[in-house]
Image (cartoon, rainbow, N blue to C red):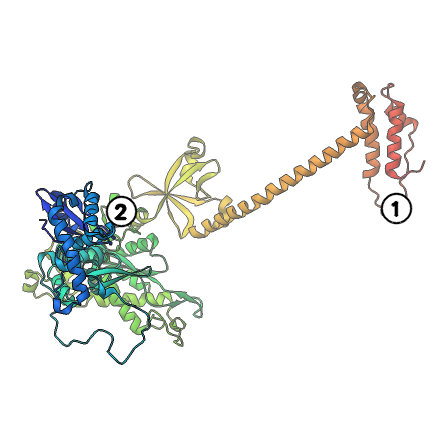
Amino acid sequence: MIFYNHVYQYTDREEKNRIRVIEIDSDVAYFVELHGDTSMPKKAFTVDLEAEMQSDILLPIPDPFAKSYSDNDLTEKQIQIRDEDWTIVTVGWANLKDDLLNKKLRDEAFDRLAIQNDIAKIKVKRIFSRFWQRGLNKNALLPDYMYSGGKGKERILTTVAKVGRPRKYTSIENGINTTEEVKKQFNYVIKKYYRKKEQLSLTDTYNYLLREFYSDKYYEGNILKFKVWDASRIPTYTQFYYWFKKLEDPQIDIQLRYSSKEFELKHRPILSNSTLETDGPGTRFQIDATIADVYLVSSFDRSLIIGRPIVYGVIDVYSRMITGIYVGLEGPSWLGAMMTLDNMVMNKGEFCAKYDIAIEESQWPAHHLSEIIIADRGEFEGYSVENLINNLNVKIENTSPYRGDLKGIIERQFRTINGKIKRKAPGAIQKEYRERGDRDYRLDASLNLEEFTKIIIHLVLHHNQKIIDKYPLEKEMIADKLTATPINLWYWGIENKKGRLQTVTDQNVMRLNLLPKGNAKITRAGIRFKGLFYGSEKALNEKWYLKFKKQSIEVVYDPRNMNQLYIPHTDGRSFDTCYLLETSAQFKGSFFEEIEFFQDLREELKKEETVNQKENTINVDVEIESIISQAVAQKKSTVPNYVSNSEKVKDIRVNRQAEKIMNRNYEKFNLVEKVSEQPAQVIEFTSKNRQIEEPSKKASSRRMEKLKKKRDEKYGKDE
């Protein structure tokens, strides 16, 4: 509700945002802005002002001019000026209030008051502005002597009196009552400043509260400054902090200051656990990858450091048993995930035997597919996920971005494994940033990939037999005196729970559905895929190269060995093999990345040479045009105009024969003597030669003489 003589502040404005209501007339309110030497009344509907208050656009604030003055503390000059101005205001406000509130009649009213009191009109405006702005009371007209003086100027001091503010030892009560209006101000600055991505501290937010609602603006030159009110008129930081904590909404604060993901990841209530979402072993597997915190060396030369390996893991949510691993240099990528899933369905005894680790099947009995696999979006979006879903009846659930907590079990196990490795393995990362003078821990790297894989296997075997703290044991488990190790939970779940374990009888079928897919094109030169050509016995027998030219077929390939392609059948289990043809034999045994690199390199070189090719073409065209233009110019200068066109073309055969004879003497080989500087021998035309020249008796003797002369000049014969 809008009240008479109350001060309000607009929250959506930076300048001229404070107003005082100086009159309320039915459904209309008059107000002035608390800024400027002169401020004239403005009119607004009370319902509009109240609506702005409901929307927290307009907030009530403490009166910045509400001060208690005693005449004993005022000078005679201050009292004199106040009383003179008060006489003008009381008469004018009593008799001309309606005119002063009316914009059209206001100037006339000011003119009348100025004439009556024999003062300037602008002074009348300033007196009424001060009266309206500062509280509609007598002391509102006191002059601002507190702002007078030579601030910043050096004073000439005497021994007569001490300058400066006198010291007072009286106690001042700090703080104000925290009314509903003050709480609205608290809530406003918290929304505007605290709940933002800039993450301002609560102290900074409190300072903004004082700046917005409990200070006065003034200028020192062109610099805007704020003067905070005295301590008895402002809320204390303790009050602000108390009400902040009392009205706090941690979820909104974290979501607005950081992000919703931050809240979901680190601060959301944990009222459930992943185990409750399962119905025995195989219901849900979680898969994830991490970069191990240790540097490895080459298997061929231990002086070569090859970097940090990738460790993939699959874990059963119900029993916490690790069901598959991959340690290598692939990834995090689909290739690494593919190798992990392949290991997941592999017999673990055979897998450990490859690394000279002998185990019983009961130590690591997992070699199954699960009903659901929870994975990151990166590796399991696209690729061969559709094959897993359609052919092997596995459901893939991709987590939201940056939500590693949704795979918390496998994430926690990775932290445990990395922690043990960092404490024991040479070449482990000991701290994120090395200080100057610290030894480079990478130089201590000693383990190769095979040895590191053995360590991971031993850690997995240890985990599968380790008691899990805080596992939510069921009543039946407690009754059966079950110890919560992954092995025990796995076997107990298989015996007592439904579970969803699936066994893969043919691992090649699993691999066929894991390998990435692509489209190949049938051409006359073979089955073309990624710039390589393949042949197939089936394609040859069924004459694909003739019947299905330019058609595309779906193929499966292993990027680590492009020697073969596989054409899967519709049953998802069988396939035809395509082999690399001799035309692409140079890429035999190459990785897919190598092939792409060489093809890209070839295209780059071709593009670079294209510029040179164009340049050569242009230059050749210029040379040709130059030769032609010179020939045309010489012809114009040497061929007489009086020779007719018929004469030019009638002796072509004779001209050709003469040119041939001269050209033969120029082109002939002399294997005995080197080329000398002696003049060339002149050929005399014999009767036999004349018989060749005289097939046409109409030959022009003049033209023949000209050719002879040209020949003699060419071979240097003197006349």
Q: Quadrant of residue 619?
A: top right
Amino acid type, mark 2: Leu
Residue 65 in sight here = no
Position of residue 532 measured from the top left corner of the image (x, y, whole percent):
46, 44
Q: Is residue 627 above or below residue 248?
A: above
Distance from disc 1 to disc 2, alpha carbons, whole Å, reads: 87 Å
Query: According to the image, label 2 marks what residue?
Result: 388
Q: Where is residue 713 shown, x and y percent of the image?
A: 88, 36
Q: Can you say whether 202 is above or below 565 in the image?
A: below
Closest to the observer, 343 or 597: 597
From the viewer's perspective, is residue 534 above or below residue 251?
above
Q: Is residue 619 above or below residue 305?
A: above
Give the residue at the far bottom of this rendering: 159
> Of label 1 and label 2, which has the lower sequence position?
2
The disc label shown at residue 562, or none: none
Type of the residue with mark 1 = Glu
Between 597 and 154, the residue placed more toward the observer is 154
- Circle 1 is placed at which residue position? 677
User: Observer-nearest residue: 584 or 276?
Assistant: 276
Quarter of the picture containing the C terminus is top right
Q: Secondary structure at mark 1?
A: loop
Q: Closer to the camera: disc 1 or disc 2?
A: 1
Return the x and y of residue 55 as percentages of the image width and height. Answer: 15, 48
Is residue 89 toward the left or the right of residue 223 in the image? Answer: left
Are dots 1 and 2 in contact, CB under 8 Å? no
